Amino acid sequence: MTDLLEKVKADAALAQASIVTPTPRRRRRGPAPSVLVAGAFVLVLLVAVALPQLFTSVDPFRTVPTDGLKPPSAEHWFGTDRLGRDIFSRVVHGARYSILIGLSATAIAVVAGSILGLIAGLSGRLIPGRVGLLVDETFGRLFDVISSFPGVLLAMVVVTFAGPGVQNIAVAIGIASIPMYGRVVRSQTLLVTRADFVTHAAIYGRSRARVVIEHVLPNVLVAIPVLAAIDVGASILAVSGLSFLGLGPQAPIPEWGVMLAESRDVLRIAWWGGVFPGLFITASVIALTVLGRALQRHIDGRKS
Amino acid sequence: MAIVHGAVENDSATATRRSSAVLPWRRILARVVSGAVVLWAAVTIAFFTLQAIPGDIADILAGEQTYPGLKEAISAEWGLDESVFTQYLAFLGRLVTGDLGTSYVQRQPVADLLAAQVWSTIELAVVAGVVSALLAVVLAVVSIGRSRVVRSAMSTLELVFTSVPTFWVGILLLMLFSFQWRLFPVAGANGWQSLVLPVVTLALPTAGFLAQVIRESMERTLTEPFIVTVRSRGVSESLVLLRHALGHALLPVMTLVGGIIGALLGGAVITETVFGRPGIGTITLNAVTGKDIPVVIAVVLFAALIYVVVSTVLDILYTIVDPRLRAQR
Amino acid sequence: MTTRNPTGGRELVTVRNLRVAFDDTAVVHGVSFTVHAGECVALVGESGSGKSVTARSLVGLTGARSTVTADALEIDGRDALRLTTREWRRLRGGFAGLVLQDALVSLDPLRSIGAEIREVLRTHHMVPRRAELARAVELLASVGIPQPELRIAQYAHQLSGGLRQRALIASALAADPALVIADEPTTALDVTVQKQIIDLLGARLDDGKGVLLISHDLAVVADIADRVIVMKNGRVVEEGETDAVLGAPRHDYTRQLLAAIPSASSRGTYLSRATATDRLPLPAREADRSRIVLSAQGLHKTFASARRGSELHAVDDVSFELARGEVLGIVGESGSGKSTVANIVLGLTRPDAGEVRLDGQPWSALNEAQKRPVRSRLQFISQDPLSSFDPRWTVERVIAESTLVLGLPAAEARDRAAWLLGRVGLDTALLTRHPRTLSGGQRQRVSIARALAPEPDIIVCDEPASALDVSVQAQVLDLLAEIQADRGTSLLFVSHDLGVVHHVSDRVLVLKDGKVVESGDVDDVFYRPQADYTKKLLASLPTAVSSA
């Protein structure tokens, strides 16, 4: 859902025809407490991704059948799952799957989407006549339609052909998210290329190439990091969702969505398996979204 | 001392003959055609993607099945001996007549498989959609113009709603309401009770995000000059909100509905799995894991159809509802 | 002026020492005035003067974050500082009606004007439900809307500017308020329509109502107001009877304001530096008619229109010449094609037919690459400078853009930018600022600095001052005049404002629907117009505001 929200925000901003501008650093009021907390959490998360052994020494894959389904205790903070594996350890080690897959999916989408969006937006101006406009229009419609289509289904289609697995769902989610970035970048490009400072640049003797490099690109690309930051949360949700369905990393990999799927059958007697992984997914997404929005507020220029 | 904008006007111009009751037929037609084109594009892309995938088409379609007679059946149905163009036309022809192909895994026509389950999914998506819309409006209206504390609380609530994974919500609700308190059934699709938990699961994230959008839209609307005029008439604040601002604020939301439909459909897939509900979700999941290509293609095209139809209808509604668009051709 | 009795009526509103603050920032500092029934009081000032806020405090609509205090604020004889929300609502619309500018955005675009009027009737229980429609139609008729039974179901965007403004007034009058507060009611309108709206408000005075008019346009105020209150920065600077204040102003600010209005009588003098008795003459300049720097021959430009099939003849056979050191004014309303002409001259658009030549050499016929080396001779100042600045660039970079092609070394470019900034009267500290942090006047000066940098022969000015306050506009126009005298630059000055054009130009071109209707020496055209259209334009100006 978060990706839809970001698309909406992007649309709203465009509806007000605003070009994202950087704020000069005037007021150093300091970040809000929620931002600090979110930042701290993300930091911890990143450490867990890189060095899980700092948090736990228990092997997440080690099965101890006799210890199965033990509730949370001093020994097993989050309890154990059906095969006696320590859930806390699995949560810690699982961080890397959700986060890294989410990040790579976003990276794929951002890069490919931005390139396509730029091409679309610029083609109206650089390719003369109706052809250019037609190309732009076509891209635009394609982006609009595909980005509204359920990303889950699109990702599932990719997985159908490529098979499940870590890399494949990263690519699947990435591909499914491309239209959203394409759409935003295209709209932003169209806005910028129609602004006076671009159309008047010819008066100063600037060549078209210079204008694109010095005026268009910086103003278009400045919106992207924020969008990406907020979207990583959505990617993580998508990763865990698809993994929950069994289309991502396969068991025994401790991906959070997989863990939730595994816990389903024994939910009645072992609630802890169904709570902690989900809690961490939610917390990660919230933290990343909060950070992303703070970044957006920081970058957004204020129009009078 | 200045000539201000605008040409010298003729204020005694008679009222336009075109009254406000006439529908902009050209625009409506344009929308419908546009929708049809999108649908056609989806179908075409699906077909040619299939062709483009490396490997023999028959093998791809066969997935992991290898029973005798399979290859021949595939070849016959898809006309693999013919030229690509003929295959494409045949494909289009089959779709138009409602023949969605055959599932080689289940050895049944796909259309039959879908028809059996589609109603359950539609039921879930529609009810969830309506619930989330109502919930969103209530959340948004309640939080407008209140104290900072209330608005922060509301924002946080919405943030949580949109950050929580659907399937986890489902699991939590299952644990609480089905296992712990035995209020609702655990699985199946019998009666309205089995609809409650899945609907709540699906509706919450949509409601959270819609509430946010509506609230921001309303806050923007409330800064418009016409609101000052309305207030200057002595109209009560609640009427200002409900009668003037809400309608305005909902307009841009209508453009989102396409995306919401998409999200509902996608969410339904997951929700059905969590609650063991029959529906398109389960079918799709099985098809994906079983490499049942014809079913996957059919589901995607079906989703595209629903999306296009609903979007086009809403697009047309939007044109009709906003009088500023009505007047143009 | 009207023949009513301005002070005979009862006191509708008495304000003593009104103070309004937003989040601890005071916006109105101790304003006092009274409005009687049957009189029109005008609050006059530029942006930031606090006139709108003052007016809104009379209906309690200054906003949630405002604090309103006063020694006395009596509205309809009651203490407004103690009113409850319910009492305020009764007062709004019932005692005082508010008319804002631009009915297109001041009326709910999703509701018919009939629905808007009926809302007022219902809120104040003016008539029984069944009679609402009839009463609404009557109200529309009373403000002079023809065929009111048909119009009642229409929406604001379906009516012309004048009609919808009347509809807005009708809705403000629906509950028969004793006071009408009109905040810039004519700003978005054309001059002939302005007059009608003002007359409409004047008629209400005859009915015995009171009118509080807020305006920045002194000509409009002169037409209708009995008393004028001049505000600056939230304070009252001068007040009195209209004739006295406008004819013989006592305060410096009022005098400056009046002197800053460009017109025929201010030609050749500084607008922003009038003293108590007379005007300061601008440095002399001469036009060298023997040298034609810019010539346009038979320009045509057509755009395909959005409507089926029809085409828009934006520019239809336009020809003119610009001599060295001369100012050629191009006058016309929106849709006259003046901006398109500017674009063609600048080489931003190609004409479909006809040619533009610079110093006798082909210009419009050249392709982009051929034009580039010549670009520095022709520069531009637009109406909205902010949108012509890259939002990410500092002032220094913006100014330097016009000379980037010269390939100056960085240090020299910076020195140049600093010098130019000084030339346009700005502090060099602004070099590192971002244009969006500057005021409108400052931005326009930066735009002028940028245009000056390559030392052009010709500067095309497209409505350079119309978005600015009168006093700021005066400074910008003076600056342009100084620069022109200094360097002998020729100006192509495009505007809809006849007064500005008369003040600034040597010769003038009148455009209508893309065609040249009349052209010639500015005094000839304006004092002895030949064409009907020119006559109509000039006749519809409100009575000139006399200045010292």
Image (cartoon, rainbow, N blue to C red):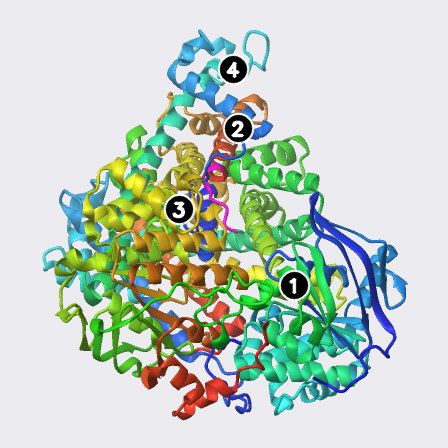
Question: Mark 4 = which residue?
Answer: A80
- Which image quadrant: the N terminus of chain C? bottom right
Chain that bears disc 3: C
Question: Mark 2 = which residue?
Answer: A283
Question: Mark 3 = which residue?
Answer: C422
- Look at label 2 and name its amino acid: Ala
Instruction: Tell me the CA gap for discs 1 and 2.
Output: 40 Å
The answer to whether tags 1 and 4 share a subunit is no
Where is residue A26? Give x, y as percent.
51, 35
Label 1 packing within 10 angstroms: few (<14), some (14-19), many (20+): many
Q: The residue tagged with tag 4: helix, strand or loop? A: loop
Q: In this view, does B16 lie to the left or right of C482?
A: right
Instruction: Tell me the CA gap for discs 1 and 4.
Output: 59 Å
Q: Foreground residue, B234 or C464? A: C464
Label 2 packing within 10 angstroms: few (<14), some (14-19), many (20+): some
The answer to whether tags 4 and 2 share a subunit is yes
Q: The residue tagged with tag 2: helix, strand or loop? A: helix
Q: Foreground residue, A63 or C387? A: C387
- Which image quadrant: the C terminus of chain C? bottom right
